[in-house]
């Protein structure tokens, strides 16, 4: 018997209608009772009952200090009576057993343990054959949920149904019941896994708050159709908001949450979340629909469908569909900074085949641009379709070397919504051979490959472009050494890891080739060792260059844990870099110097990146992040990042980010985040909240303000919202988890229990 999912919630403070409560998950919320004193439930201890073997399931073991037999049917056991069956243990001062009826009468200090609960009573009886029984003045405790209750009469019927009269229960410890429930009549039907309560009152301390004439709720982990927890909130975009979700348990592998929503500024909305799971497929469908937005006087919607299917052991199919009625929908209806600043919605369908040493894919991909500030010509191309083939195989393996052959090939048809953009197909193939040779102290990896690309496209006027094929050889040599030394008498070692990487790709004029999917790579330490300085394959960078890099690490030699690392590197160019996206030749003799640092010591973690431009003697990119955490509920983060736009410094990015969770007093925590743009001198996102968590309940209040840059809100580009979350531990949250999700996104490293 369990009340794990008894979600007693209502927005009303008076009489509520008849409710059928449901649960939408097979896994209970994980909540922490760590605030409870260790001995807070010691008045009723639970000890798991014995588990008998299969050939002894029907056996009954009885022991007592004294046994008196009256006739052939009656046995009286007195003094420390112990009765054990499979998944049942009973203690009593006195027990009277009738062999003819199998009725066991119990008296004096009764204590029982079942598979999921403990019970004590003044008196009672139990039929050892049918398991029917009654207990008078009982107290019961369910350790899994910390549920503690009492009932004047606890009745158990033969059909595995229990009736409790005038029962009171809570997850709070005795003597400190901040909340409890009083129920006049409670039935627990284990066969149907359903609990039914009549005339129930929810109390906060000594104050009655909610009255429920009738409630039905699931027992255990079984899903059940019914109402879920309502949600109340407020935001500057939507105004006062109230939603009441209904859970529909369609089938064991299908369910849906249908949520009517009322928004004071926007009007009524219907949201649907449907999900399914089978042996070969899983997916979910989300649909939000407003028949008439009161502010805009128009229909609005958001649609999302995601499916992943396994057709065979090696063949899979994925489908992703997204659609929004207008560009401002996410900004008006989103709940955090990341959601409201999405610029594109992707749609794709793809088949993937994974062989032992090769893989192939077929994909169609389009985008819906929902940021009206992005010009038509700057929007992404559609791939209709894209066919890929990759293969990799090792040959002639020896102790420290092998020959590796790889192949990457692709054919794709590009389309664009603008008629002034080049469109057409691209075929690309890149075979490559590598010969890695390595030992514990060094490695060397020579590689040679050939890139061939063929275009069949139109130009910006729609005329056949007649582009020449592009063929380029790729030769590289990667090498490195590993040195290490003990750091005096400590358990740490320091490594020194120099690395050289040479790359040669001849120049070929690519200015006539349209840019379908290429862009400049973000410069980082890892990019020092990449063969192409561009993303995509419309531009293959010419190269005659040598990368010189040095890394060092401090490791704990007992467990291999890394405490500190630093890497620095630079590329030296022996020839000008003539291939570019803007037809500008790079005549520099070397790249920027890139340095990356990271460290971890006890509760502290830090990482930093610094990119130094040797031509301008200034920093083009820098960032630092510092994290401190005593636990996953006490964290502090501070960060800074700067990026210089190489074309227009007006677009420079410089931001600071501060977030923390501070338990400033017993049971109380302060939560906050502040993201600030130094270049624009404005807040990007702010959040502040307070949280109280006791032994058996918790409450959290959050307020957040984030920028949306909505085209309709030029006077006030911010959206402000307030979220309240109230949790009865062991019973679940009586509001939705928007506050929890917001905190996980906003505060790095914070893992709330509710």
Image (tube, rainbow, N blue to C red):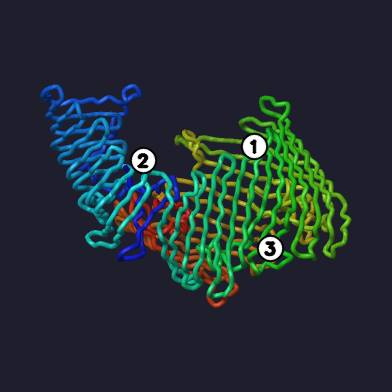
For residue 675, side relative to residue 578 (left or right): left
Task: Say which of 202 and 163 sits in front.
Answer: 163
Q: Is residue 491 above or below residue 166?
A: above
Give the residue at mark 2. Answer: 191
1 or 3: tag closer to the N-terminus: 1
Quote the CA–CA distance across marks 3 and 2: 70 Å
Q: Secondary structure at mark 3?
A: loop
Q: Secondary structure at mark 1?
A: loop
Find the residue positioned furthest to the bottom: 715
Residue 285 occupies which quadrant of the picture?
A: bottom right
Give the residue at mark 3. Answer: 646
Give the residue at mark 1. Answer: 312
Mark 2 packing: few (<14 Cα in 10 Å), some, or many (20+)?
few
Q: Position of residue 648 (x, y in %)?
A: 68, 67
Q: Position of residue 692 (x, y in %)?
A: 33, 58
Task: Say which of 272 and 646 sits in front.
Answer: 272
The quadrant in which the N terminus is found is top left
Q: Is residue 400 visible?
A: yes
Task: Say which of 130 and 480 sits in front.
Answer: 130
Q: Position of residue 563 (x, y in %)?
A: 49, 43
Q: Could you tell me which residue is drawn at 61 percent across and 40 percent down? A: 497
2 or 1: tag closer to the N-terminus: 2
């Amino acid at each position: 018997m369990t009340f794990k999912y008894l979600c007693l919630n209502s927005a009303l403070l008076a009489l509520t209608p008849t409710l059928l409560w449901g649960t939408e998950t097979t896994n209970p919320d994980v909540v922490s009772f760590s605030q409870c004193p260790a001995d807070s439930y010691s008045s009723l201890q639970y000890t798991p009952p014995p588990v008998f073997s299969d050939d002894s399931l029907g056996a009954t073991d009885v022991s007592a200090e004294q046994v008196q037999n009256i006739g052939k049917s009656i046995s009286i056991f007195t003094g420390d009576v112990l009765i054990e069956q499979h998944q049942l243990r009973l203690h009593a001062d006195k027990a009277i057993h009738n062999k003819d009826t199998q009725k066991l009468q119990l008296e004096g200090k009764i204590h029982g343990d079942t598979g999921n609960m403990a019970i004590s009573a003044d008196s009672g009886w139990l039929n050892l054959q049918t398991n029917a029984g009654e207990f008078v003045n009982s107290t019961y405790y369910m350790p899994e949920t910390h549920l503690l209750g009492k009932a004047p009469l606890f009745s158990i019927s033969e059909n595995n149904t229990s009736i409790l009269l005038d029962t009171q229960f809570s997850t709070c410890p005795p003597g400190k019941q901040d909340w409890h429930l009083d129920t006049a009549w409670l039935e627990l039907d284990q066969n149907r896994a359903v609990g039914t309560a009549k005339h129930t009152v929810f109390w906060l301390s000594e104050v009655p708050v909610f009255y429920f004439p009738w409630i039905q709720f699931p027992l255990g982990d079984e899903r059940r159709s019914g109402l879920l927890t309502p949600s109340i909130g407020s935001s500057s975009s939507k105004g006062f908001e109230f939603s009441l979700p209904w859970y529909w348990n369609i089938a064991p592998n299908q369910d849906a949450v249908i949520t009517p929503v009322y928004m004071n500024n926007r009007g009524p909305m219907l949201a649907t979340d449907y999900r399914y799971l089978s042996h070969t497929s899983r997916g979910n469908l989300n649909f939000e629909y407003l028949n008439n937005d009161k502010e805009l006087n128009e229909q609005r919607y958001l649609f999302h469908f995601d499916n992943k299917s396994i057709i065979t052991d090696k063949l899979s199919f994925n489908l992703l569909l997204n659609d929004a009625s207008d560009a401002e929908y996410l900004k008006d209806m989103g709940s955090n900074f990341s959601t409201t600043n999405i610029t594109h919605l992707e749609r794709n369908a793809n088949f993937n085949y994974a062989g032992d040493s090769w893989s192939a894919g077929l994909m169609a991909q389009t985008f819906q641009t929902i940021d009206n500030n992005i010009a038509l010509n700057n929007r992404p191309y559609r791939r209709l379709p894209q066919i890929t083939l990759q293969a990799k195989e090792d040959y002639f393996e020896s102790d420290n070397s092998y020959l590796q052959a790889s192949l990457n090939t692709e054919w794709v048809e590009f389309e664009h919504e603008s008629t002034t953009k080049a469109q057409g197909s691209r075929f690309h193939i890149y075979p490559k051979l590598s010969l890695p040779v390595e030992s514990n102290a060094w490695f060397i990896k020579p590689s040679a490959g050939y890139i061939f690309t063929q275009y069949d496209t139109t130009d910006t006027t729609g005329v056949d472009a007649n582009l020449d094929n592009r063929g380029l050889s790729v030769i590289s040599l990667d090498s490195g050494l590993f040195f290490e030394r003990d750091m005096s008498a400590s358990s740490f070692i320091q490594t020194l890891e120099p690395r050289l990487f040479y790359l040669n790709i001849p120049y070929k004029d690519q200015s006539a080739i349209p840019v379908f999917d290429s862009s400049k790579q973000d410069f980082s330490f890892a990019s020092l060792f990449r063969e192409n300085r561009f993303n995509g394959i419309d531009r293959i960078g010419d190269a005659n260059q040598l990368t010189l890099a040095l890394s060092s690490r401090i490791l704990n030699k007992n467990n291999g844990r890394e405490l500190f690392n630093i890497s620095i590197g630079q590329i030296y160019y022996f020839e000008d870099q003539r291939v570019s996206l803007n037809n500008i030749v790079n005549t520099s003799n070397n790249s920027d110097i890139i340095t990356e640092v990271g460290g971890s010591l006890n509760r502290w973690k830090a990482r930093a990146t610094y990119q130094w431009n040797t031509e301008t003697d200034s920093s083009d990119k820098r960032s630092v992040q510092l994290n401190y955490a005593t636990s996953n509920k006490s964290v502090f983060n501070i960060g800074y990042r700067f990026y210089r736009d190489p074309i227009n410094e007006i677009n420079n990015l410089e931001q600071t980010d501060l977030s923390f969770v501070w338990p400033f007093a017993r049971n109380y925590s302060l939560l906050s985040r502040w993201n600030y743009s130094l270049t624009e001198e404005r807040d990007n996102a702010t959040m502040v909240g307070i949280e109280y968590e006791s032994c058996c309940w918790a409450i959290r209040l959050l307020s957040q303000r984030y920028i949306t840059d909505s085209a309709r809100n030029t006077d006030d580009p911010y959206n402000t919202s307030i979220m309240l979350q109230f949790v009865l531990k062991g019973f679940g949250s009586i509001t939705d988890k928007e506050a929890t999700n917001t905190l996980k996104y906003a505060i790095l490293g914070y893992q709330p229990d509710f």
